[in-house]
Amino acid sequence: MSALLSASDLNDFISPGLACIKPVKEAADNNTETNDDNEEYGVQINAKGAQSTARSTTKELPSASISLQDCLACSGCITSAEEVLLAKQTHTILLEDLKNFKDEKCFVFSISHQSRISMSLYLGLPVSQFDQFIIRFMKEKYGFQFAVGTELGRVLSINQIDQQIIAAKQSEKGIQLSSVCPGFVLYVEKTKPEILPYLLNVKSPQQLTGLLLKTLLSKELGRDLTDIYHLSIMPCFDKKLESARPELVNEVDCVLTPREMVELIKESNVNIQDYIFPSQMDRLYQQSAPREWPCPSESWSSNLGSASGGFAWQYILSLQVSNSDLKTDIKEIKGKNSDVVEYHLLNSETGEKIGSSAVVNGFKNIQNLVRKLKPSGKVKVGSGIASRRRRRGIAGKSTENTEQPPEEAVVVANPTACDFVEVMACPGGCINGGGLLETEVNREGLITKYNGLPQIERLQDVQVVNGVLNTLKKYANLDSSKVFSYEFTKIEKLTDVVSVGNKW
């Protein structure tokens, strides 16, 4: 294990071990036959005893290697392994790319809000000063020409998610699950393919930010998309695997976590304070963004909701806006633990539920959620022993004191009954991602710091969002499905004797 990454650091770590089964394909064109001066001959004897002599040759095969794409096409592991992560996307690989392609490519980077919070706390800086440092450091030390926050990509993702949930609700498709967490998506593709129909096919803020960056810069600079090198700084190691999905390879070239970025800073041997001096932040954000980047300052702001992106809360807000003719209330319902919460939009006058969403974090809660879902689209609700006991208790009470007014029903969190569930693999969500740095601040403190980020305003404007979408479709020459969609794949489970035996 490296000093930077270890199994204990990753919530999703599962070693490939003997289950890593990348198929070996022998490429005839690349294989070469070699003969040295000391040629060897072999004697063959057939069934009749006749002898024959043949010259012996040796085939040189290329060395085997495992890439991130191989991991995505294999069911040997559930998610990421350190050996694979280090093979493709690390800060040392980034330095090599900077050296090899400095004159050929335009280097740009985007950074998530969670990463900014984590690194600012680790370095002992206010978020605004950290933003100054990271923008100037990457530009002056390594030649990065542009830098943006990921809020614009998140707004585009939220907007598309809301549209798809509402369409699914109107057509009575039932519950919809978010697909912005690559750890959860890989878990479903490799172990629970029957859940694939529930996934909303909408790209994450990481990928949409990359697509928008490359599209606008390609037009602005008059260069191919492949000439734009996009580094994405994310809180989770699984984001590396997401960027390596075959349908997404041109949107993000490299993903680094705050842990790796701090290693890069340390190896650079710079004085952080040299990059921090009084400046107008709005002007700095604008100067660091592409010329046609919409609302540069607000790309570094955040939106209301969870520290994973607020997808569940934003859906409720969009429903509230679409039902503005009604007086409504939002009710929050806590789950059995802090990683499960529901939001209900209620008609204030009638109490009728207009819509609902939930947040489910951590694999234990995800497994409970998945267990209740059926491929038929129905869900198991109240089928356990505790539920039967509650029903018997309620039935018994109904025969007693019938003259007393009924008490208000206790609402229990049940994400499977919601319109939409925001699902994140890490306990606590993205603010607790495996790539974040360890600090003295606990999870609640991180969330408080996150909620202290400036809130977006104009980016929520429908005209702004539609303008961005039209720009993408026009300049990238893509339709909506190519702009927003993944290509989910059912990954076949291993059936060979050795691999199956290894699981015993």
Image (spheres, rainbow, N blue to C red):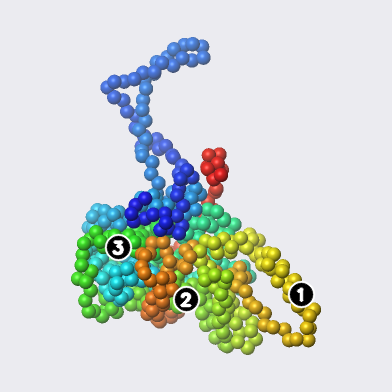
Q: Residue at x 65, y 86 (%)?
A: 350
Q: Who comes first in sequence, dot 2 or dot 3? A: 3
Q: Amino acid at mark 2?
A: Gly
Label 3 is placed on what type of residue? Val
Q: Secondary structure at mark 1?
A: helix
Q: Amino acid at mark 1?
A: Ala
Residue 262: give its label.
Answer: 3
Q: Which mark is residue 395?
A: 1
Q: Tell us which disc is closer to us: 2 or 1.
A: 1
Q: Position of residue 288 (x, y in %)?
A: 27, 72
Query: Which residue position is annotated with label 2?
Result: 305
Where residue 366 appears, as percent x and y from the top left, is: 55, 63
Query: Is tag 3's residue or tag 1's residue first in the polypeptide sequence?
Result: 3
> Considering the numbered disc 2 on the image, is that residue within a helix, a strand or a loop?
loop
Locate residue 338, reporting x and y percent.
52, 71
Q: Residues within 10 Å of mark 3 (few under 14, many from 20)?
A: some
